[in-house]
Image: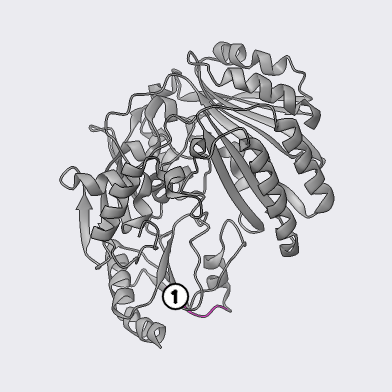
Amino acid sequence: MAVSHFLTAIKAELTKEAKLLSDSSTEEFKVALERWSDRDLKTPSAIVLVATEEDIVKTVKLALKYNVPFVPKSGGHSAWSTIGLEGIIIDLSNFNSVTIDTAAEAVTIQSGVVNKQLIGTLYENDLCLPLGGGNTIGSVPQALGGGLCALSKICGNTSDNILSARLITSTGELITVDEHTPDLLWALKGAGQYYGLVTSLTLQAYPISTLRSPDGTLWTGTFIFSVEKMTEIASLASTLMDEQTHNSANIAVVTLNPESGTPCLLIMCLFFGSTAEAEEYTAPIKALGPLVVMENRTKYSDINDGMDAFCAKGGFKQFKLAGATRFDPEPWGEIANIFVELKERCPDVVSGGFGFEWVTGRQKVIELDSAWAHTEVKSWVESLSWYTNEESGPAVDESTERALTAATRSFKKEEIHTYQNFSRDSSLESRFGSQERVEKLQALKKKWDPNGIFTKVLL
């Protein structure tokens, strides 16, 4: 009953450019419902495709008035951007302008902007920004959760570069969050999803020369090995992780060869600097005898294109991360075998894998504290599950747990970090660091969202 009253009311309030989708049998509704993963996908009573900030404010206010729960959706990658018939989705994807202030080297983005659009606009203006590694990821939500990225050593994470935000509070009020609300700005930098619905962010950008090349390009390298090389690669990676002279971002993952569909070891490297420097950095990798080597110089606007295959919508997917300030290479031969066994057990595993990523270079000093607690992490262990038969879920989950347990078994519990953009069931301390930081976040949650409109996390 509450939802029907809401639907009647919102129809009269939306701008003509907005759309209200409430018939789940239509193709338009089905397309709007699509997400990165079909895992735990629910069907809401309605999807509100907003077009303006006014649309968003009115939708939130009426949802609050009629006690209708809602979730925002930007790029559709979040495991929590889905809701059942009891609620609605506020789809932000059409609210997606990018405004560049070239004098201030700052960019303001609306909440429907995705990384490919933002990076392209920055590149056109000879600017860059630390952003996550997927073209279709929503730029605002990934920034609010921290924004792990290839440029984190040079520029900090995305959240470190938040200057201000426009935010709808739990009472439906639209406010500006900036230096005049320092505690709330602090919380938005790493835990921002839990304090309101952010309609736009203003971020610090950087000259394109930050990429350390004269033409706005970076070097990319892709190396494919046999799975049996994982132990040697992990041992080598443990030394490369300490590199401070060269700036690079790297991932090593046991996955499926896109040509044959059989398990392989894939290494991908983004290098910021000259080709000669990149070849020097990757020489030890090549010395281990890759089966395939692909090297190129790529425009900054195409920095994430190598991950497009992993960003496809649909299928059953889940992404998990666990980080630590040290790396243990010992279990990775075992972990590689877990993935090989999983593919044998579940032939419908079509991609994904188990791996680790690291960023090299000297860490930029972040002057202002924030809710982000993972700057000192040396390496992130990652698991991407991707299968097509829902019945394979338990087997995939079991293998994932075995792999993550093996990768972190030499660490004490307090050493393990988890990334809150991918986890809401790990401890608050693993997501946000010290007890002092957690308590500050909890106090701010009670102040700004005491009833848990934007999830019960931190209450």
Tell me the residue at 60%/40% (across/down). 382
Residue drawn 35% across the image and 47% down it: 438
Instruction: Give how far across and how far down residue 304 sits, in percent.
Output: 54, 37
Q: Please give the range of residues in magenta.
A: 20-24
| Position of residue 277 measured from the top left corner of the image (x, y, whole percent) | 55, 12
Which residue occupies the foreground of this view, 438 or 147? Answer: 438
- Is disc 1 placed on a helix, strand or loop? loop
Q: Is residue 315 magenta?
A: no
Model colouring? one colour
Q: Compared with residue 121, is residue 68 higher up or lower down, i.e. above or below?
A: below
Q: Quadrant of residue 239?
A: top right
Side of 358 relative to 141 (left or right): right
Neighbor class of circle 1 (other Cα within 10 Å; few <14, some 14-19, many 20+) is many
Q: Position of residue 448 (x, y in %)?
A: 25, 59
Q: Amino acid at mark 1?
A: Gly
Q: Quadrant of residue 206?
A: top left
Q: Is residue 301 visible?
A: yes
**55 shown above or below 141:** below
Asked if residue 201 shows in the view, the reply is no
Kindly identify the residue that appears in the image at 37 percent across and 58 percent down: 95
Q: Is residue 218 left or right of residue 92?
A: right
Task: Please identify the dominant SS of the magenta region.
Answer: loop
Which quarter of the image is occupied by the C terminus?
bottom left
Which residue lies under the disc numbered 1?
Answer: 87
Outermost bottom residue? 1
Q: Residue at x 67, y 50 (%)?
A: 385
